[in-house]
Structure formats: structure tokens, C-alpha cells
Amino acid sequence: MKKIAVIGAGLTGAAAARTLVQQGFLVTVFDKGRSAGGRMSSKRTDQGYLDLGAQYFTARSDVFKQQVQLWLEGGQAEVWPCTTVLLAHEDGLSSLKSSRDEQTRFIGVPSMQSPVKALLQDIALITACRIQKLSYQQQSWSLLSDEGQIYAGFDAVLLTLPPAQAQQLMAQSSLPVRFENTADVLEPCWAVAMQAEASPAGDAIFCQHPKLRFISHQQHKTGRNSCYILHFNAAFSAEHLHKPPEFWFAEARVILSEELKIQQSIEPLVAHRWLYASQNDQVPAPGLITLPDQQLWAGGDWSYGGRLENAYLAGLKLAQAVIHSYKLQQETV
Ligand SMILES: Cc1cc2nc3c(=O)[nH]c(=O)nc-3n(C[C@H](O)[C@H](O)[C@H](O)COP(=O)(O)OP(=O)(O)OC[C@H]3O[C@@H](n4cnc5c(N)ncnc54)[C@H](O)[C@@H]3O)c2cc1C
């Protein structure tokens, strides 16, 4: 039985791992985080979950629609009954404009990462384990964690990390680096959670704004704290990347009170910095990155244009690349 190491327990890694296990491979998934989910994670607090990363997902392809249907039936996802609105900013003034659409938006329940955890059920998962070096000898991979633990005997490795992190890992492993043009495909985002009552205008607020990308209120999300999550846009997040949480809380407070006209009390909860958040539209999506001679493949949401659906599809494609490679080997024996 072929042993596969999947590094990264986000949606890409989980989809790849589940597909490979279904095809009879022996899979171990590694993640540096405390649990699976990656950028699809919610932070657990005493008052409920805070969705600091992905806010919702949509399903356009048949294969992802089928998967979402399984999550809905399994109780790991539900439709987000949100009202969409646009925060426009013209001539220095902000205004909320109606922008209703027919798009169905889904969320994980009780937290965003529930669908990832469902995919990884009964699959070996090693968390709080940052892989810092890979080595390939006699057609077998060993993984070294930053705590000095060695995991050996893998026939193939899948890297499902943001490209800058995958590039760093490959460089530390003296492997040919194949990410020269893709390291900056994912851009940063500061995410800020603020306790406040919802504005009646809407709870999914798309922003055409000098500082913001998206604001959501969690009032209609099962299991969540009733609060706002503000996602600052890539340019503003990059410009102030190293500012402390207090800076972000102050920015968020001004936007909620002056631009969304929230009258009630506004309390800061959490500010989180994502160094690699979402796709830079100016950089072409590179597809999967492969080192076929060493049985190593890399991919993620960034391979196909960002977003959760593309992470899922990348996971399927990574698994198919492994399956195809072993089929070819069997045919040539
Ligand atoms: C703020 C924000 C808002 C977003 N909003 C949306 C949205 O509304 N809708 C949508 O569809 N998408 C959204 N996205 C994008 C979506 O979250 C991603 O497309 C998706 O989660 C990517 O999944 P992935 O598995 O490819 O990568 P990730 O989720 O990043 O998974 C990579 C995993 O690798 C792990 N890792 C990294 N380095 C190592 C290492 N050396 N060793 C071990 N583990 C390692 C990380 O801990 C992580 O868990 C958003 C993302 C962010 C950050």
C-alpha cells in the first residue's frame, strides 16, 4: 500500500487526503496549526465562534455541488441566509447601496472548518507539527518537524500550503524551487472582529472602499458570536502590515460608527493578520506544481484562482495526479 504525506490540513489537503484514502492509499496529514481548517478556520471564544478567515463559500461546479450536498445532509454546512449590500466610496464619502443577488452562500457549522474536519474523519492527522525540511532518498520521503521529529517512509508528498510557504520549505530542503513567479500570488489581509449589533442594511457587505474588502455580521450564522468581521483590503493591510491590534480596532470602530452608522456600543474582540489570504488577480493562476521524478506535487486554492471551491478542486487534482502516476508505474512494470 502506497504511503502519502499531505502537508497542510486546509480544504485542499483534506480533499486530496479523502480522495486518496478512498482509492486505497495510506495517508497522513500534517499541519502546523492546532486543528485542521487553515484559512477556513473560525476562532473559538467563550461567546461562540468568530469566522476570521473565509466567510462563506459558493458552489458552481457539479463535483463541488455534490460535496456541499453531502455536508448539508451531514449537518456540517448550511445555507447562510444573508442580505447582501454594497459599501461604496465616492468623492471621500461612503454610502450603502442595495446589491441583492440570487447567489446561494454556504457556511460550515458550527464553525467554518467543520466541512474540513468531516473530510478528514478517520484519516491520520498530526497537528501542531510544522514541517521544516523534506528529504528524498532511495525513492522514499522523510519529513522533519521543527521539534526534531522525523516521519519517514512516504512514497509521495503533497504540499498544500500557500506558495510562499511551499517555496520556503522546498528551499530549506534543497529541492528545485518552482514557485519563482507565484510566491506573491496570495496577498495579506487583516481581519478584525468587533462586538456590535447588526445594521439593518445587511449582513454581507461587499466593499468598494479604499481600506476594506468585505464586512460581515454573524447574526445569521449558527454557532457564532453576534459581531462584525471586517476584512481590510490587500493594499491597506500591506501598507500597515506590522501595526498592532489597537490600530486595527481603532480603524474598525471608525468605519462601523461613521460609515455603517452603528449607534450602539462597539467592543473590540480579536484582530488577526493573514499573511497569505486571497488571490492577487494580477498574477496568473499557475495550476499544480510538480516534481514528478520525486513524486512531489504542490497546489492549493491559488492554483486555480483562489476561493474555497478552487481549494477543493485543487485537492481532487492533486489526488488524481498521484493516482495517475501510480497507474502509469504499474502499466510499465
Ligand atoms: C481573510 C480571508 C477571507 C476569505 N474569504 C473567503 C470567502 O469568503 N470565500 C471563499 O471561498 N474563500 C475565502 N477565502 C479563501 C479561502 O479561505 C481559501 O481559498 C482556502 O481556505 C484555501 O485552502 P487551502 O487548503 O488551499 O490553504 P490553507 O487553508 O491555507 O491551508 C494550508 C495549511 O497548511 C498549513 N501549513 C503551512 N505551512 C506548514 C508547514 N510548514 N507544516 C505544516 N503545515 C503547514 C497551514 O497551517 C494551513 O492549515 C478567504 C481567505 C481569507 C484568509
Image (spheres, rainbow, N blue to C red):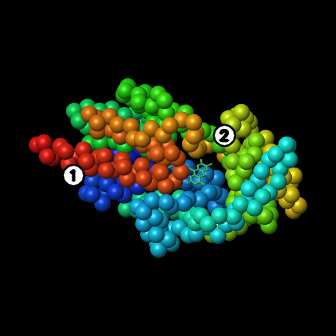
What amino acid is labelled 2 in the image? Ala
Tell me the element at label 2.
helix
Q: Can residue 188 be seen from the camera position used here? A: yes
- Residue extending farthest to the left is 333
Q: Is the residue marked 1 within 8 Å of ligand 1, measured from its CB?
A: no
Q: Quadrant of the C terminus?
A: top left
Q: Which residue is mark 2?
A: 234
Q: Which residue is mark 1?
A: 1
> Does 272 sit left or right of 90 as displayed?
left
Q: Residue at x 71, y 60 (%)?
A: 99
Picture quadrant of residue 111: bottom right
> Does 181 sit left or right of 262 as displayed?
left
Location of residue 299 with respect to 267 vertically, above or below: above
Labels 2 and 1: the sequence-earlier one: 1
Tell me the element at label 1.
loop
Q: Position of residue 77 (x, y in %)?
A: 53, 67
- Residue extending farthest to the bottom is 73
Callout 1 crowding tier (Cα within 10 Å): few <14, some 14–19, many ≥20? few
Q: Position of residue 137 (x, y in %)?
A: 26, 31
> Does 174 sit left or right of 214 as displayed?
left
Q: Residue at x 42, y 49 (%)?
A: 314
- Looking at the picture, tell me which residue is in the foreground, 124 or 38: 38
Q: Can residue 32 be seen from the camera position used here? A: no
